[in-house]
Every structure is written in C-alpha cells, then in structure tokens.
Image (tube, rainbow, N blue to C red):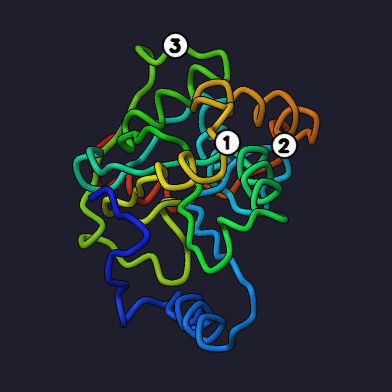
Amino acid sequence: MPHIEGDPVDPKSRHKGKFETESYLEASGIPWTSVRPTYIYGPQNYNDLEAWFFDRLVKDRPIPIPSHGQHFTQFGHVQDLARAMAAILGNSKAVGQIYNISDTRYVTFDGLAKACAVAAGKSPDDLKIVHYNPKDFDFGKKKAFPLRAQHFFADVHKAVDELNWKPEYDLISGLKDSFNNDYLPSGRQDTEVDFSVDEEILSASGQT
C-alpha cells in the first residue's frame, strides 16, 4: 500500500462487479475510462461519513472508534472528483485507463475525528475518543462506524501525471466546506440522532 491501479483486486470483494465491468469494457473495444474514488465527501454527501462525526461533535459526545484508531484511510472531495472526471472527457490519454481519484494524503481514524473537530470549530484537544473491539459486540444490521475497520488508501499520482489534475481541497478545508455549506444549512445539528449503538459501546467501555 498505497494501492496503485494495476494491483490485483480482491475476488471476494462485494465490489467485484465494478472490476468485472472494467474487464468487459476492455474486451469490448468501446473507448472507456474507469475512475476509482476512495471515500467521497463534501456537500450533499448521501453517505454518512463526515456527518457521522459532526453529529457527535456538535452534541459534545465521545467518538467511538474501532480498534486502536490507527487504521489509515483516505477522503476525496466531491469537487476534486468532478474536476478529475471533467479532465478525462476528450482526453485521448485517458482511453482504456483506470485512475484512482482522492486526496494525495492519508489520515488515521483518530486523526480524522480530530480534523472533523477542527472543521466544526471544536478543539481537537478536548475531543474524547473511545476505542473498542468490534468483535466484542453484535450490532446486527446497525452500523457502529461509517468506515471499514481496515487500512484503505490509494495512490493518485497516475491521475496527477496524466490528467493535469491535482486535488484543490486538503482534508481540513474540505471538511469545513461540508460542515458550513451542507451540515449546518440543512439543520441537521438540531435533528434527533439515534445514538443507541454508541451508548452500547460506551456502557461496555465504562464511559457512561
């Protein structure tokens, strides 16, 4: 790691259909380009990623993070993704190519929680992070944490070199954009959030 575009894919992945589609297009002779984002964030995100952290931060709640909190992950801002896609259109270099698109830097789970705190106007030094072992719990279909509890990050230099593209958002500025231009205007800070899974974790950790 970080993964590059030519690395073998996991044949057991629930996303293997995406790789199968790439293989199909390659064999078809149709001009194609594949974009592989990591975690996408930013305003109007349908996936609770940064908002999951903001929900807890605005209510001054502890942040439950699985394992040791040192797994590396990677966020890519939606506008940077859109710019990369626009750079592909009409670009002969991009035909038949695969591009990882995300930020150029990685962050640990603990670091992400602290970055979200900064974006929300909170002091990262006051943040209370509670680590727990996911194997000690059975949450059923409820999601206790919005990210995979594993390292997940990719190299984006191919896109930088071939598409004349680079991310404009660093993590803090991107999270501030999401918080100020989506989370707050939506009024989500005033909505009721189900913290029952958090409470289960905190109770077992002796934090409540």
Residue sitting at 50 percent across and 25 percent down?
170
Could you tell me how far apart the alpha carbons at marks 3 and 1 are, in whole angstroms? 16 Å
Instruction: Give the residue type that dot 1 points to.
Output: Asp
Report the disc number at residue 55: 1
| Disc 1: CA contacts within 10 A as few (<14), some (14-19) or many (>=20) | many
Could you tell me how far apart the alpha carbons at marks 3 and 2 are, in whole angstroms? 21 Å
Instruction: Give the residue type that dot 2 points to.
Output: Arg
Compare marks 3 and 2 and give the one earlier in the sequence.
Answer: 3
Could you tell me how far apart the alpha carbons at marks 1 and 2 are, in whole angstroms? 8 Å
In the rendered image, residue 2, in percent from the top left (x then y), is placed at 27, 48
Give the left or right position of residue 23, taking residue 94 as reference. left
In the rendered image, residue 4, in percent from the top left (x then y), is placed at 32, 55
> Viewer-proximal residue, 77 or 182?
77
Compare marks 3 and 1 and give the one earlier in the sequence.
Answer: 1
In the rendered image, residue 181, in percent from the top left (x then y), is placed at 75, 28
Residue 108: quadrant of the picture: top left
Q: Which residue is mark 3?
A: 123
Secondary structure under the numbered disc 1 in the rendered image? helix
Residue sitting at 46 percent across and 71 percent down?
141
> Viewer-proximal residue, 148 or 188?
148
Residue 177: quadrant of the picture: top right
- Vertical relation: 4 (above or below) 51: below
| Disc 2: CA contacts within 10 A as few (<14), some (14-19) or many (>=20) | some
Q: Are marks 1 and 2 in contact (CB under 8 Å)?
A: yes
Q: Which residue is mark 2?
A: 188
| Disc 3: CA contacts within 10 A as few (<14), some (14-19) or many (>=20) | few
